[in-house]
């Protein structure tokens, strides 16, 4: 037999946190800003500097070749020495056989274009002996002027990568610091709101930080105090009413017991049934109003459920899905009342009820007619009954599942209604 699946209504994918969303937006914005900055830097700074550098380099090469040609042969060695020492240029009047330079580097193309413009003819760039060489036809000589490859190291790609990486790192660290300062109080507020059960011993939010967060914390603390006071007053009021009503009920029972023997026994029996129904209704109302302030205890779950099931006259089977020995901090009185109400409700409407324990989920399954999907939220409301009559023998007081819902909310549990695999109702309590 297939066992019930997980609790219905639980979302399959949690939404991104505020911290993750904000960091994502800032990261995308920072990336766009960096791309724009790199494009602007390349267009207005790097490319103009590279063009000016190539033009200056071409002017120096042409001027050096012209000067070398115009000097007497005996003065040329001194000029070559001066160029090598002061300008890192090597001039050779003898043509050497060299390989063509690699023009995949943008700067070399710029330099070749500037040399060709200044000489009015195509100029070849060569590589050899660890140097770059420009062939300059000048005064009947094919002069080769060599210079160090380091002079061409203008790398806009590397500049862009450095800006992108370092800029993104700075933006990420800054946004992380700012966002954490904003989201930390919000995360704390979300945790307090989630754990607030209407008790008087709630821990208020610290009213500090930005003005908006202080206002939020103050509003939550005020609301929590008012809700706690309202629930406390409601409990006190209904507890007092219940106590005051039970006193005349006791007197009525005593009066019935003292009636003469000639009074119709059926009349007395009818009065006794009405008094019992009134007493049960008052007890249900009192339990609904009080909720629970019970402190959790370490409970071995499977053993505890067996003890609860043993209290019913009808035998109720229990199946356990590999969770024998699981111990949880629970309020045993609240859990006992929840199980008793749910199982009692199932026994009232079905011939067979069973319990299945799967980890922290307790499934109470019955073979009854089931609860329509459009009524599964309404049945947890006080005094709501699928049976429209007010007959307690068919519809109950209408407080059983309302008490279950309130106790689960007070303890941080979750209760949901689904369809049992074999038909009927599956009420799941997730601890």
Image (cartoon, rainbow, N blue to C red):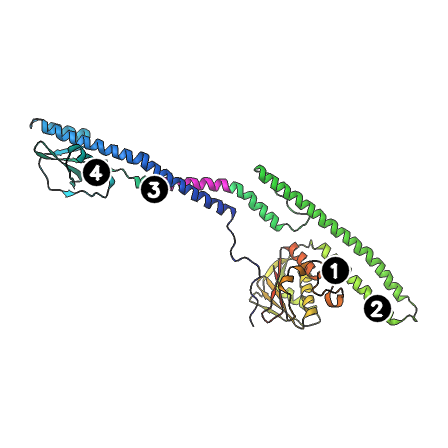
Name the residue that disc number 2 marks. Answer: 270
**Left of 371 or right of it: where is 146?**
left
Q: 200 or 300: which is nearer to us?
A: 200
Name the residue that disc number 1 marks. Answer: 284
Q: Range of the magenta residues?
A: 161-179
Earlier residue among tags 4 and 1:
4
Name the residue that disc number 4 marks. Answer: 149
Residue at the spot x=15%, y=43% of the render? 99
**Left of 178 or right of it: where is 163?**
left
Residue at the spot x=42%, y=39% of the render? 170
The extreme front residue here reads 120
- Secondary structure under badge 4? helix
Earlier residue among tags 2 and 1:
2
Local packing at callout 4 (Cα closer than 10 Å; few below 14, some 14-19, many 20+) is: few
Name the residue that disc number 3 marks. Answer: 161
- Secondary structure under badge 2? helix
């Amino acid at each position: 037999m297939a066992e019930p699946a997980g609790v219905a209504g639980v979302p399959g994918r949690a939404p991104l946190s505020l911290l993750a969303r904000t960091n994502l937006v800032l990261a995308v914005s920072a990336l766009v800003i960096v791309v724009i900055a790199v494009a602007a830097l390349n267009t207005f700074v790097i490319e103009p500097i590279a063009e000016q550098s190539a033009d200056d380099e071409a002017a120096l090469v042409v001027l050096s070749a012209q000067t070398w040609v115009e000097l007497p042969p005996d003065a040329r060695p001194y000029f070559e020495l001066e160029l090598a020492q002061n300008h890192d240029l090597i001039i050779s009047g003898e043509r050497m056989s060299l390989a063509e330079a690699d023009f995949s580097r943008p700067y070399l193309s710029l330099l070749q274009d500037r040399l060709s413009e200044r000489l009015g003819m195509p100029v070849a760039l060569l590589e050899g002996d660890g140097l770059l060489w420009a062939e300059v036809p000048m005064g009947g000589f094919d002069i080769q002027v060599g210079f160090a490859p380091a002079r061409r190291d203008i790398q806009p790609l590397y500049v862009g990568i450095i800006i992108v990486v370092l800029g993104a790192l700075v933006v990420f660290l800054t946004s992380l610091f700012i966002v954490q300062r904003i989201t930390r109080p919000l995360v704390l507020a979300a945790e307090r709101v989630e754990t607030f059960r209407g008790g008087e011993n709630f821990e208020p939010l610290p009213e500090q930080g930005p003005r908006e967060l202080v206002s939020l914390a103050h509003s939550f603390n005020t609301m929590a105090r008012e809700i706690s006071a309202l629930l406390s007053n409601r409990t006190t009021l209904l507890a007092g009413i219940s106590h005051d009503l039970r006193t005349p009920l006791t007197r009525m029972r005593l009066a019935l017991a003292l009636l003469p023997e000639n009074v119709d026994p059926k009349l007395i029996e009818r009065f006794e049934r009405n008094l019992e129904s009134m007493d049960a209704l008052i007890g249900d109302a009192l339990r609904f109003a009080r909720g629970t302030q019970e402190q959790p205890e370490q409970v071995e779950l499977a053993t505890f459920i067996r003890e609860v099931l043993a209290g019913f006259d009808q035998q109720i089977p229990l199946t356990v899905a590999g969770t024998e020995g699981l111990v949880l901090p629970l309020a045993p009185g609240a859990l006992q009342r929840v199980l008793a109400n749910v199982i009692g409700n199932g026994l009232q409407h079905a011939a067979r009820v069973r319990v299945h324990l799967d980890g922290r989920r307790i499934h109470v399954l019955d073979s009854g007619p089931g609860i329509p999907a459009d009524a599964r939220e309404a049945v947890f409301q006080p005094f709501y009954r699928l049976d429209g009559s007010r007959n307690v023998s068919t519809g109950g007081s209408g407080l059983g599942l309302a008490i279950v819902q309130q106790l689960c909310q007070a303890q941080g549990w979750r209760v949901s209604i689904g369809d049992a695999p074999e038909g009927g109702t599956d009420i799941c309590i997730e601890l």
